[in-house]
Each structure stands twice: as C-alpha cells, then as structure tokens.
Image (cartoon, rainbow, N blue to C red):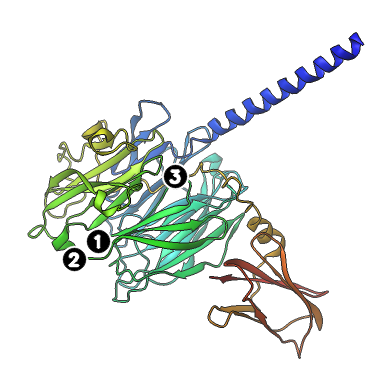
C-alpha cells in the first residue's frame, strides 16, 4: 500500500511538473515570438529598435523616403530586411535593403510609386526565411497595378535575394491603403488592396487576397458603400483583426467588421460621411487604434494652405454611444509643419511623425534642415486613456540626429495569434488538400438568383463527381456527373448556403479541378 501510495504521489507530481513545463514552454514561446515588429526603418536614415523595453533606441538606416516603408524582424527581434519607395528618381521604384543596409540581391526595378501605404511584407506561411513583398502602384500616369515579389533569405549567405519579381495581381489604379492581417488560423494571411476611384467612380471596392504556403490566391472582391477617395485613404485594423477603420482625405470615417476566417467584410458603421475637407477640416490622413481598442486616434492633413493651414490630432471614444460626438482635439500645428503618420508600437505607445516643408521641392530635406518637427516623433504614452490622461507629448521622442518625413513603417501585426474558439483553421486545409486553381473550370455565383454556375471544358474524363466544400472543409453538395464532348455545366443552387467562401471540385479518374466562389 505504501509503495502504491508513493507511486500515485510521484505520478501526480510528474503530471504537475509536466503541466508546469508545458505552461512555461508555451509562455516562453509566446514571448519569443512577439518580436517581429521590433525594428522600424523610415524617414531620412531613421531607425528604432523596440527590443530594449521600456526604452527604445535609435539607429541609422538607409531609408530616404517621404512615405511608404516596411520592415520585418525575426522571432528574436533581429532585422531581416526592409523596403521603401524611392521618391527622388524620374522612374519611381521600391528599394529593398538587407540587414547590413545593403541593397538586397536582385531587387532592382521592383515596382512602386511615391505615396505612403503602398508596401507590406508578409511572411510566407509555414516557410521559414521566405517572404512576400506586396507593392501597389498608385500615382503612375498609366496605372501599373498591384504586385508581389518573393524573397528567399537563405540565399546570398543569409542576406537574402529576390527570387520572383513584379508578379502582377491586378492592373488598375490602387488606393494608397495596402495592408495585411493574419488569417484566423494564425498562420496564413489576408492582403488588402483597394480600387482607387480617382477617375470619378464612387464604389468602395476591396480586393482581399488569401496568402497560403507558397500561394497567393484569386482575390475576394467586395463592393461596400460608396466612397470617393481620390487615392488617399487608409485601412487600419484593431488589435485582434476583427474590425478595421477606413478613413479618407475627403472626411470619410467608417468602421467595418472583418471575418478573419472567411475574408468577408460586413457591417459598415459610418462615423463621419464624406464632406468637403476644405470646410470641415476633417481630411483624415492617418489613424491608429489604442491597444485595448477603446480609442481611435486620427490626424488630418493640409491640402490647401490658403484655406486650411492647420493639421490636427483627434481622439475618439469607440465605447461612446455617439462616436462622432466624442471627438477630442489633442493637438494642432500650423503649416509649414504637417501631420505625418500614427502607429501603435510594440511598447503599446502610439508614435506620430511630422513633416516640415522647407520649401520647394519639399523633399529630400536640405542637408542642414533640422528642427523640432522633423528630428523627433510625438508620443501618446497611454493611448487607452481618455483626453489629457492619454499622455500626449509633442516631439517627445528624439530620433538621435536622424529625421522623419510623413511615413512610419506599414508593418502588419506579425505576431497576431489564431482567432481563439473560431474553429476556422481549415481554409488552409482546403487550399492545400482540395484547392489547386484550374484554368478550364469556371464558377460564377449570382447572389440575386442564388445560383453558382459551374462550367468546365476540355475535361479528360467522361464521368466524375462534383463536390462543394464550405469554409470548414465540410461537404455541402455531392453529385455524379457526365460530360458532353468534354464539357460540363451545372446550376448549383445556393439559397441554403451561409455567407462565406466555398470550393467547387470536379474529380475524374484522370484529373482533379478546383475553383472558389463567394456567397455574400
């Protein structure tokens, strides 16, 4: 009995030790992985390392850009590479630099233009040392579109090289609001671009690309409410990626719900409709959520010095019954100083750049042009707190002798985890197991008729099976079929389908064809 009791005691103790070790391991891994946004490279040679908590340190980078810039660190906070749009050449391009501040191998002539949120870096899911660099070309006279380049950091002695360059995803003028958010499975990614209605159309069209291991899929295209953006708009995600704010320089501010499992946008809540920015002064330029998502900060930009030479920083209470009425003006600056970019940093503070116009051409700055505005960042020390308690300090963070323009890094939430309890860790399974896009299978869904029109041609088999899967990988529909001279057609009723992404699969003994469609 004593031996049995001792055995039970030891076994119980071993369980406790095992649980403790597992918890310790998980905690250490969680802490280990929260470093990929630690390095910021921006402005004129500016760099910040947030790995030295609670006191970030500055360093010299090779960035010289007024706007678009991105960077990524590894899981222990060491810089991997960074990129920025070059604004001083006749043919605008994207410059990519490795961790030694040298040009990344084979990165010449990557497309880019001269605005502010045109770049985003996305790690290749499940592949260490592999990355996508997405670039939107906004201001070219003939729009080039939206592109990605692929980077393999195992090459060139670990300093990396571009292995695919300028793969085009669309060919229209894109809005200045490229961004990315992790899929609900915590592994894959959604990358956002937007149609720019610069030429007069008013539809608010989002293009949402799913990125899985080594694949960028056909976009989910959603038209929401009307929004005339004249290129300048921003998309800012909250802390868990389930909501985002869309703001524009013509006064629009609206918040959407986002389903990280399906990639579907819904429930637009308009806080401010579009108005004439020269009258109301709310030409929203940049924004950031506080860490607890209770506050939203927005800053305005100057577009007419003679009419409205004032830039402003606002705070909004997202818990208020009337968010628009909760507006609190924290700061005003007068031209030639101008608001730059707001970014929530790894230390949970919000940093804010300002640009100073020293006269034509405005950038690059003259070598001797240093002042309070371009040599420092302003800081919101306690963004979750209301009003003056947020601890806003103008010019409160010195850049250590380097300078800022408008831009701060457009880094996504690299370390965002899975959407706990969502059960959506299946779209990758669909993508990898069921989904290899076919060029001879076409699926068009008509939401009014509630029918998915399935058509195939040049089929190799004469008989087969049609299967439709939902986002959870569940079989929704299955039917045997027969070809007619290599053709197949099916009107698949979807009136009982819930909104979301679906995969159609045609299987014969000789081939397997797949395509996606969306029920909205």
In contact (CB < 8 Å): disc 1 and disc 2: yes
Real-space Cα distance between discs 1 and 2? 7 Å
Number of numbered callouts drawn: 3
The N terminus, quarter of image = top right
* Residue 410 higher or lower than 22, as above or below: below
Location of residue 9 in the rendering, given as x and y in whole percent from the top left corner? 81, 15
Dot 2: element: loop
Give the labeled residue for mark 1: 251
Frontmost residue, 191 versus 369: 191
Could you tell me if residue 106 is visible in this image? Answer: no
Residues at circles 2 and 3 in contact by the CB criterion of under 8 Å: no
Residues at marks 3 and 1 touching, judged by CB atoms closer than 8 Å: no
Residue at x 80%, y 75% (from the top left corner): 508
Q: Residue at x 38, y 35 (%)?
A: 348
Q: Where is residue 115 in the image (x, y as percent from the top left)?
A: 30, 57
Based on the displayed image, in which of its 4 quarters is residue 453 positioned? bottom right
- According to the image, label 3 marks what residue? 239
Give the residue furthest to the left. Answer: 306
User: Does residue 32 appear anywhere in the picture?
Assistant: yes
First-in-chain label (2 vs 3): 3
The alpha-carbon separation of the residues under discs 3 and 1 comes to: 24 Å
* Label 3 secondary element: loop
The residue beneath circle 2 is 276
Q: What is the number of the mark on residue 461?
A: none
| Quadrant position of residue 285 | bottom left
Q: Where is residue 380 in the image (x, y as percent from the top left)?
A: 28, 36
As rendered, which of 327 and 176 lies closer to the eye? 327
Q: Is residue 305 left or right of residue 13?
A: left
Bin the neighbour count of mark 1 within 10 Å (Cα to Cα): few under 14, some 14-19, many 20 and up. Answer: many
Report the side of 431 relative to 72 (left or right). right
SS for callout 1: loop
Crowd class of label 2 (few under 14; some 14 to 19; many from 20; radius 10 Å): few
């Amino acid at each position: 009995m004593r031996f049995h009791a001792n055995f039970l005691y030891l076994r119980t103790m071993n369980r406790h030790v095992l649980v403790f070790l597992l918890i310790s391991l998980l905690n250490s891994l969680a802490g280990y992985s929260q470093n990929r946004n630690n390095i910021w490279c921006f402005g004129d040679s500016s760099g910040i390392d947030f790995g030295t908590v609670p006191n970030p340190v500055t360093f010299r980078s090779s960035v010289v850009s007024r706007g678009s810039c991105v960077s990524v660190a590894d899981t222990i906070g060491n810089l991997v590479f960074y990129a920025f749009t070059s604004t001083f050449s006749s043919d605008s391009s994207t410059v990519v630099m490795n961790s030694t501040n040298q040009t990344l191998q084979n990165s010449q002539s990557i497309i880019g233009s001269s605005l502010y949120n045109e770049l985003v870096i996305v790690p290749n899911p499940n592949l260490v040392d592999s990355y996508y660099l997405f670039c939107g070309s906004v201001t070219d006279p003939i729009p080039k579109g939206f592109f990605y380049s692929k980077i393999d950091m195992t090459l060139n002695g670990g300093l990396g090289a571009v292995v695919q360059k300028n793969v085009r995803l669309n060919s229209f003028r894109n809005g200045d609001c490229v961004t990315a958010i992790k899929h609900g499975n915590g592994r894959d990614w959604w990358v956002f671009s937007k149609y720019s209605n610069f030429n007069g159309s008013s539809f608010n069209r989002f293009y949402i690309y799913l990125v899985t291991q080594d694949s960028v899929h056909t976009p989910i295209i959603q038209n929401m409410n009307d929004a005339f953006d004249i290129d300048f708009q921003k998309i800012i995600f909250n802390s868990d990626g389930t909501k985002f704010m869309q703001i524009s320089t013509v006064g629009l501010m609206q918040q959407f719900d986002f389903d990280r499992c399906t990639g579907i946008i819904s429930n637009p809540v308009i806080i401010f409709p579009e108005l004439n920015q020269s009258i109301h002064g709310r030409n929203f330029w940049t924004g950031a959520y506080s860490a607890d998502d209770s506050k939203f900060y927005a800053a305005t930009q100057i577009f007419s010095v003679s009419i409205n030479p004032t830039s402003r920083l606002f705070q909004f209470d997202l818990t208020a019954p009337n968010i628009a009425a909760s507006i609190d003006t924290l700061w005003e600056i007068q031209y030639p100083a101008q608001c730059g970019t707001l970014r929530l940093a790894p230390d949970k503070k919000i940093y804010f750049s300002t640009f100073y116009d020293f006269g034509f051409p405005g950038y690059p700055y003259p070598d001797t042009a240093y002042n309070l505005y371009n040599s420092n960042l302003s800081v919101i020390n306690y963004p979750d707190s209301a009003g003056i308690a947020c601890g806003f300090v103008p010019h409160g963070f010195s850049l250590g002798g380097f300078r800022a323009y408008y831009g701060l890094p457009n880094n996504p939430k690299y370390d965002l985890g899975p959407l706990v309890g969502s059960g959506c860790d299946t779209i990758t399974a669909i993508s990898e197991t069921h989904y290899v896009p076919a060029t001879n299978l076409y699926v068009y869904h008509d939401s009014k008729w509630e029918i998915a029109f399935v058509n195939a041609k040049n089929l190799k088999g004469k008989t087969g099976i049609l299967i439709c899967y939902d986002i959870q990988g569940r079989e929704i529909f299955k039917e045997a079929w027969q070809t007619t001279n290599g053709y197949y057609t099916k009107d698949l009723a979807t009136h009982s389908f819930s909104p979301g992404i679906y995969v159609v699969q045609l299987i014969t003994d000789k081939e397997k064809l797949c395509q996606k469609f969306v029920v909205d």
